[in-house]
Amino acid sequence: MNLLRRIKAFIVRDFQLAISYRFEFFIKILWILGVSTTFYFIAQLASRGLLDTANYPNWQNLLTAWLTGLAMLNYFLVGFSSLANAIRQEQMQGTLESVLLTPINVPTVIISSSAWAYVEATFYSFLYLFFGWAFFNVQYQGSFLLAAFFLLLTTLCLACLGILSASFAMVFKRGDPFAIFLGVGTALFSGVFFPKEMLQEELGSAGNALSAINPSTHGLDGIRSILIQGKTFTEVQPQLLVLLGFLAVLLPFSLWVFSNAVKKAKRDGSLIQY
């Protein structure tokens, strides 16, 4: 009986800790909803059989669409989670204060803290595309250089969202809620696992709006159009201009928020807290 009481005490303690971060608790519930919704649409794909390539031109081959989607998702996830994770790790190790009190400027801290995560993500994302080509005869078209440029632009946009997530972690010591929310949005609304048009068909204008405000939607659409349909620079200009617009707004805003988060943490003396 003593054992059961002790187990119960630990469960109650951990439950109270979990729900004390209400936003994170709520976002995790949304994550489950997002995963369930994703598999609903995948099931719809299976029930429909072959897709109408006129309506879903980037889904002429499901394996190619999924491999490009997974490769980009792997990279995008790093974009908006690597800095927040690095900040949390520095907080846990007690080294964040010493890093931020050095004469290193904010952009340098941001780039340096995330550098290895991007190197690792580049390698693993490449493997998705390489294994598809080497073992499953997946054929890619168009300019890989242009696709890489789209990947860079999209990653920069998502990295800006990652900077906002890191700012949240800096002040509130919790970065996961933002990462989970962005992860659900990217996987569900950008068309990683199923055509984004299906979401728009189900949700109407709301689905269209949710896809439109997500930078990864335009990035993945452009990359797939290049690698699957072989589109040229001129043909993917609309997606390119949207990404440049996102970057022009998000980059200065995220750097401003992060700088203020650092100042607040220094002022409050909370850099060594976690």
Image (cartoon, rainbow, N blue to C red):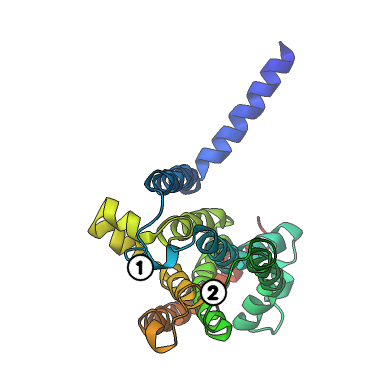
* Quarter of the rendering containing residue 76: bottom right
- Residue 201 locus on image (x, y percent): 27, 55
Q: Which residue is mark 2?
A: 155
Q: Residue at x 46, y 82 (%)?
A: 252
Q: Secondary structure at mark 2?
A: helix
Q: Residue at x 72, y 57 (%)?
A: 92
Is 196 left or right of 71, judged from the image as shown?
left
> From the viewer's perspective, is 147 left or right of 269?
left
Q: What kind of residue is marked 2?
A: Thr
Circle 1: residue type: Ile
Give the camera-side residue of 4 and 54.
54
Spot the residue most to the top: 1
Q: Write down the quadrant of residue 74 in the picture.
A: bottom right
**Residue 213 shows which numbered tag?**
1
Tell me what residue is drawn at x 52 percent, y 63 percent: 69
Q: Of residues 197 and 110, which is closer to you in this image?
A: 197
The correct choice, above or below, for 202 with respect to 53 in the image is: above
Q: Residues within 10 Å of mark 1 (few under 14, many from 20)?
A: some
Category of crowding for the residue at label 2, using alpha-carbon neighbours closer than 10 angstroms: few (below 14), some (14–19), many (at least 20) = many
Q: How far is the residue under mark 2 from the one under mark 1? A: 15 Å
